[in-house]
């Protein structure tokens, strides 16, 4: 008799009874739903790709259940597929919880493994530009109130990742320019290495006040949902500051 349903396919391939197979399929579906809803909270239309992927996996499992006749091979294949899907979905939920701050890539990148993460993020940011930019608060001029910081001494480079629009980066850098900072490229650079980072990098103690002033301005701008800190790195040249920001 042909197997037509995923529950029956899992049951046949793993040797589990129908009730146990139903629990497995329901758990996988729940994890998938959480991942889809959380990852595409501002881009619900994009979830169709994930839905098609899940349907494709289900179809492959059903097909395998109908063509594999050896009971041992059925169990090996069934447990392997079920385990891989469960591990992937658990990692997906973990990526959502960590929000790009761990070793896992952002969830929206894991859902689209065949695309470069920075391209996925850029596309999502562009699709949701109006909503993302409505949350920001970038003044026309970013002034430095600290008497110990002379903006004209510092050259600032910007690297960003995630759901930040390039227009927001340009607006922020132009505000810095208006405040006297040196900005070689107002467009900044979208880099996957910036994912999970929210910091201004500087060389030494003399440059720390300027780095802190930039970090405070970034936090106030609300381009990221997390506070921006500072980080001392010896590879940074004196009077150079690097913004690494993501959302």
Image (cartoon, rainbow, N blue to C red):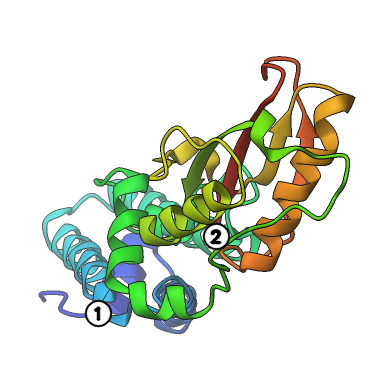
Position of residue 178 relative to residue 17, above or below, is above
The 10 Å Cα crowd at callout 2, few under 14, some 14 to 19, many 20 or more, is many
- Residue at (58% x, 53% y) in the render: 100
Instruction: Determine which quarter of the picture holds residue 69.
Output: bottom left
In percent of width and height, residue 104 lies at: 55, 46
In percent of width and height, residue 94 lies at: 60, 60
Distance from label 1 to label 2 (Cα)? Answer: 20 Å
The 10 Å Cα crowd at callout 1, few under 14, some 14 to 19, many 20 or more, is few
Quarter of the figure with the N terminus? bottom left
Q: Disc 1, disc 2: CB below 8 Å? A: no
Position of residue 104 relative to residue 172, above or below, is above
Label 1: element kind: helix
Label 2: element kind: loop
Residue 209 makes an appearance in the image: yes
Position of residue 23 relative to residue 242, above or below, is below
Position of residue 138 relative to residue 77, above or below, is below
User: What's the mark number on residue 45?
Assistant: 1
Query: Mark 1 or 2, which is nearer the eye?
Result: 2
Q: In the visual, does 100 lie left or right of 236?
A: left
Quarter of the figure with the C terminus? bottom right
- Foreground: 9 or 220? 220
Residue 17 makes an appearance in the image: no
The residue singled out by tag 2 in the image is 247
- Foreground: 188 or 28? 188
- Residue at (37% x, 55% y) in the render: 166
Q: In the visual, does 237 lie left or right of 87?
A: right
- Foreground: 174 or 66? 174
> Number of marks in the image?
2
């Amino acid at each position: 008799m042909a197997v037509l349903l995923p529950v029956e396919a899992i049951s046949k391939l793993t040797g589990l009874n129908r009730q146990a197979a139903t629990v497995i399929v329901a758990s996988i579906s729940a994890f998938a739903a959480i991942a889809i809803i959380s990852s595409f909270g501002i881009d619900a239309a994009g979830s169709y790709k994930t839905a098609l992927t899940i349907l494709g996996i289900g179809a492959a499992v059903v097909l395998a259940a109908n063509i594999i006749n050896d009971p041992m091979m059925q169990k090996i294949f069934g447990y392997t597929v079920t385990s891989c899907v469960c591990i992937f979905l658990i990692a997906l939920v973990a990526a959502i919880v960590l929000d790009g701050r761990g070793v896992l890539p952002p969830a929206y990148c894991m859902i689209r493994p065949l695309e470069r993460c920075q391209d996925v993020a850029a596309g999502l940011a562009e699709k949701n530009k109006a909503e993302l930019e409505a949350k920001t608060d970038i003044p026309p001029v970013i002034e430095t109130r600290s008497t110990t910081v002379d903006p004209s001494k510092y050259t600032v480079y910007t690297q960003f990742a995630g759901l930040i629009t390039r227009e927001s980066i340009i607006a922020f850098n132009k505000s810095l320019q208006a405040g006297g900072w040196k900005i070689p490229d107002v467009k900044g650079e979208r880099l996957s290495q910036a994912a999970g980072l929210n910091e201004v990098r500087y060389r030494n103690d003399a440059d720390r006040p300027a780095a802190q002033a930039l970090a405070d301005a970034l936090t106030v701008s609300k381009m990221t949902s997390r506070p921006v800190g500072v980080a001392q790195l010896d590879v940074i040249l004196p009077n150079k500051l690097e913004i690494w920001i993501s959302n």
